Image (cartoon, rainbow, N blue to C red):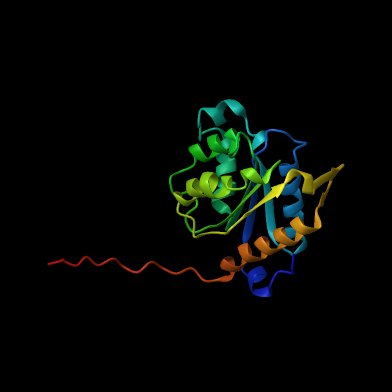
Amino acid sequence: MTKAAPDIQARGCRFLVISASASGTSRSEKLGDHIASLLAGCDMNVDHLRLRKLPPEPLLAADATDDEIAGAVKRLEDADGLIFITPTYKATYTGLLKVFIDLLPQYALRGKSVLPLATGGTIAHMLMLDYGLRPVLQTMWPRHIEQGCFILDKHLVADGDQLHVNEGSTALLDEVLDAFRKPLSLPEIDPAPMHWSRVM
């Protein structure tokens, strides 16, 4: 990934990686660590939220008053850029991600840039991003949703705490991460006032 532009760094953008695997040894969570490390290496302010570490009972009950759940929502609210990473289960994103999204306010992504990523065993499931996850995220009013990418499991090799990414997937990941950061360097645009006109 190319070094962050100075103007982006000066804005102090905050990034949150959200990994949605139920397993601590999953490739998708290690990919989340890998991406967080890449962004931190570019002097970015980055955090990694592992949904599997949230308390299951209040998460399933959508209890936003629970301290840990409320803390997770606050981390999302405070971020300028969000990276959702999910393994592919039954040709779609995980139930863990679904229950987390369900407890968020309707417009929780308003004003944010979003990057959806997925891992899976076959390219037959790569459309799950466009037909599964992206439409759900779009309803929450993000400022921008980047194209995202689907990475095959076989292109991710774990070696202890390290993750080795296939050369082709590394190039693709660098491209989408660079594209994802660009909208964050642009100033916010205040919505123009809405004027109603009578159609005769």
Q: Position of residue 199 (x, y in %)?
A: 16, 66
Q: Is residue 135 left or right of residue 12?
A: left
Q: Which quadrant would residue 191 be assigned to in this image?
A: bottom left
Q: Residue at x 62, y 30 (%)?
A: 55
Q: Residue at x 58, y 66 (%)?
A: 184
Residue 157 in view (yes/no): yes
Q: Which residue extends farthest front?
A: 124
Q: Residue at x 28, y 65 (%)?
A: 194
Q: Position of residue 89 (x, y in %)?
A: 63, 35
Q: Quadrant of the C terminus?
A: bottom left
Using the image as rendered, state which of residue 83 and residue 68 is in the foreground.
83
162 is higher (above) or lower (below) than 67: below
Q: Which quadrant would residue 58 be assigned to in this image?
A: top right
Residue 12 in view (yes/no): no
Q: Position of residue 103 (x, y in %)?
A: 49, 37
160 is higher (above) or lower (below) than 110: above
Q: Quadrant of the N terminus?
A: bottom right
Q: Is residue 169 left or right of residue 195?
A: right
Q: Which residue extends farthest bottom?
A: 6
Q: Residue at x 65, y 71 (%)?
A: 10
Q: Is residue 132 left or right of residue 33?
A: left
Using the image as rendered, state which of residue 185 and residue 64 is in the foreground.
185
